[in-house]
């Protein structure tokens, strides 16, 4: 048996280490280590509960809106507040724009550049990959970065700034858009649609969103999506890094009549209702002291001894004792999209296709939200902080299910726990020895002579790691 340590995977930031045990050229066992402890949960203890709205977005500069939305929802639940319908819609629009920008960044800057590597020279698609996705030089990357910057004008209009806005509050949003802002938002989204339907998809988004079979997906012959699908077919990315088929979504973009993308659990080919009370954080293989507990009762106490069998700062969240995968694919599977259901349980192809599908569908969502803006409506409701209470903020970041749990005692934060998407996907083993989703997906992957095997990189990047969000 050969032991191989790979990392960092540093296109977002480099705090990830994967230890592989290799037998006969394939991964027999993987251990995923989140080597950076940050302590945000401890920072919040004893503070005014409203401080969470300021502090938690600083966890991440990529998904700060997601952290804002989760903190606002947790505080709002503790206060007994429900956002106004228009406030909820604008919070959803701000959040959707960040998630879409994140998907765009992942595809162009984090995932596709690996296929421009010299190791793939001679493949029929390699020349196109070099032209479109070579780091810092690819023509696809330049247009994507420009389109992303223009999309984020939404943040300037509605959130004031990005990242780390205070626009999203427990009762709604701080900015009430008028007719002028509505017109500008519509123009921004029309321009973004032109980009998506041009270089990326090469055709109508509604046509891509209507795909309902693997054959239909693989036959999509337009835009940079077609290049990805050619690569996926040649390298069998469908069979690489396959998942458990267990998916969780907290429900994306809550509106007056429910979330835009449904909330629930998909396992064994069956959709079931989510019971957040079944979530536990297992500490058996984490450098943490304490007992396995629901996040509302959990604690974050680092174990400075860092003793075996623990090998990561990351706790191991489980739902009813099971590991679950989260992300765009999970959202679309839970929401019932036919193509996503076909892809359920799949590997690298499924996860990336899930993001592309969500890009196409979310554009229409954002357009509907802007069309529904009512100038002069109420965008905020007020409330009072409780002396004692608790609340949970369960939202969907680009990378998947994000949860904030807050306890308030004597007007101060008595406990604050966060489970980020990467906490779910990059978790270590639990007390039963069950590997986390990435660890399980890496088992069986072929390992060549490269210092960092390309197949391992593709699997890791298909989950889109953001390790600074993982351990708080």
Image (tube, grey):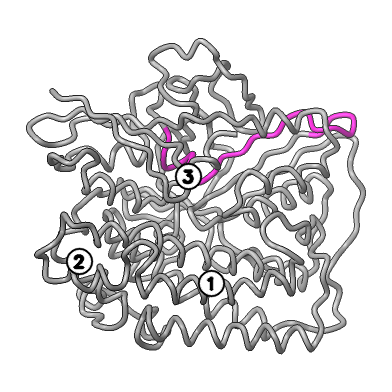
Dot placed on the residue nearer the N-terminal end, 2 or 3: 3
Where disc 3 sits, the SS reads loop
Distance between the Cα atoms at labels 2 and 1?
Answer: 24 Å
Q: Quadrant of residue 322?
A: top left
Q: Residue at x 79, y 88 (%)?
A: 179
Label 3 sits on residue? 13
Give yes or no for residue 413 being in the magenta stretch: yes
- Answer whether residue 464 is magenta in the image: no
Extent of the magenta region: 408-427
* Label annotation for residue 148: 1
Residue 293: image quadrant is top right
Q: Quadrant of the C terminus?
A: top right
The x and y percentages for residue 271 are 42, 56
Residue 261 % position (x, y): 53, 66
Question: How far apart in space, not on screen, are marks 2 and 3 (Cα)?
Answer: 26 Å
Residue drawn 23% across and 29% down?
A: 4
Kindly identify which numbered label has been placed on residue 423. none
> In the picture, which quadrant includes the N terminus?
top left
Neighbour tally class for label 2: few under 14, some 14-19, many 20 plus, Cα within 10 Å: many
Cβ atoms at labels 2 and 3 below 8 Å apart: no
Q: Do residues under tags 3 and 1 come within 8 Å of each other at their CB atoms? A: no
Note whether 426 is above or below 430 in the view shown: below
Residue 435 rendering spot, x and y as whole percentages: 33, 32
Residue neighbourhood size for the residue with mark 3, other residues' Cα within 10 Å, grouped as few (<14), some (14–19), many (≥20): few
Q: Is residue 435 above or below residue 332?
A: above
Q: Are marks 2 and 1 in contact (CB under 8 Å)?
A: no
- As drawn, is 168 to the left or to the right of 249? right
Q: Position of residue 122 (x, y in %)?
A: 9, 64
Nearest to the observer: residue 32 or residue 239: 32
Circle 2 residue: 231
Q: Secondary structure at mark 1?
A: helix
At 36% from the left and 68% from the top, the residue drawn is 137
């Amino acid at each position: 048996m050969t032991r191989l340590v790979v990392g960092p995977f540093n296109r977002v930031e480099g705090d990830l280490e994967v230890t592989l045990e290799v037998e006969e050229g394939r991964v027999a066992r993987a251990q995923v280590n989140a080597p950076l402890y940050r302590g945000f949960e401890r920072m919040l203890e004893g503070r005014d509960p409203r401080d969470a709205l300021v502090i938690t977005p600083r966890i991440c500069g990529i998904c700060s809106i997601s952290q804002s939305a989760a903190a606002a929802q947790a505080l709002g639940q503790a206060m007994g507040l429900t956002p106004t319908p228009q406030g909820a819609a604008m919070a959803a629009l701000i959040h959707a724009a960040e998630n879409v920008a994140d998907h765009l960044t992942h595809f162009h800057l984090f995932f596709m550049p690996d296929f421009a590597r010299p190791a793939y020279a001679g493949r029929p698609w390699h020349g196109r990959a070099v032209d479109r996705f070579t780091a810092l030089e690819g023509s696809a990357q330049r247009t994507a970065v420009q389109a992303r910057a223009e999309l984020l004008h939404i943040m300037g209009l509605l959130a004031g700034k990005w990242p780390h806005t205070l626009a999203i509050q427990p009762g709604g949003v701080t900015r009430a858009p008028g007719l002028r802002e509505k017109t500008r938002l519509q123009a921004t989204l029309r321009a973004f649609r032109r980009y998506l339907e041009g270089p990326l998809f090469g055709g109508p988004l509604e046509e891509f969103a209507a795909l309902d079979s693997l054959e239909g997906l693989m036959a999509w012959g337009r835009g940079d999506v077609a290049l990805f699908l050619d690569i996926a077919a040649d390298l069998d990315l469908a069979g690489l890094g396959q998942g458990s088929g267990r998916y969780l979504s907290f429900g994306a973009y809550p509106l007056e009549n429910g979330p835009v993308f449904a909330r629930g659990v998909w396992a064994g080919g069956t959709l079931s209702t989510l019971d957040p009370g079944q979530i536990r954080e297992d500490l058996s293989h984490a450098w943490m002291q304490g007992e396995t507990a629901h996040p509302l009762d959990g604690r974050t106490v680092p174990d400075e001894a860092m003793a075996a069998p623990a090998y990561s700062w990351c706790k191991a969240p489980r739902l009813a004792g099971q590991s679950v995968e989260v992300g765009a694919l999970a959202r679309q599977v839970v929401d019932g999209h036919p193509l996503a259901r076909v892809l359920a349980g799949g590997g690298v192809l499924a996860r990336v296709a899930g993001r592309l599908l969500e890009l196409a569908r979310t554009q229409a969502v954002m357009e509907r939200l802007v069309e529904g803006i009512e100038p002069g409506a109420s965008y905020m409701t007020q409330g009072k902080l409780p002396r004692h209470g608790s609340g949970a903020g369960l939202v969907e970041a680009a990378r998947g299910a994000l949860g904030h749990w807050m306890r308030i005692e004597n007007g101060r934060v008595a406990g604050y726990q966060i489970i980020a998407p990467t906490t779910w996907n990059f978790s270590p083993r639990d007390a039963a020895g069950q590997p986390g989703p990435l660890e399980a997906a890496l088992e069986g992957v072929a390992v060549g002579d490269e210092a960092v095997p390309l197949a391992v990189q593709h699997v890791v990047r298909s989950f889109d790691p953001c390790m600074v969000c993982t351990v708080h």
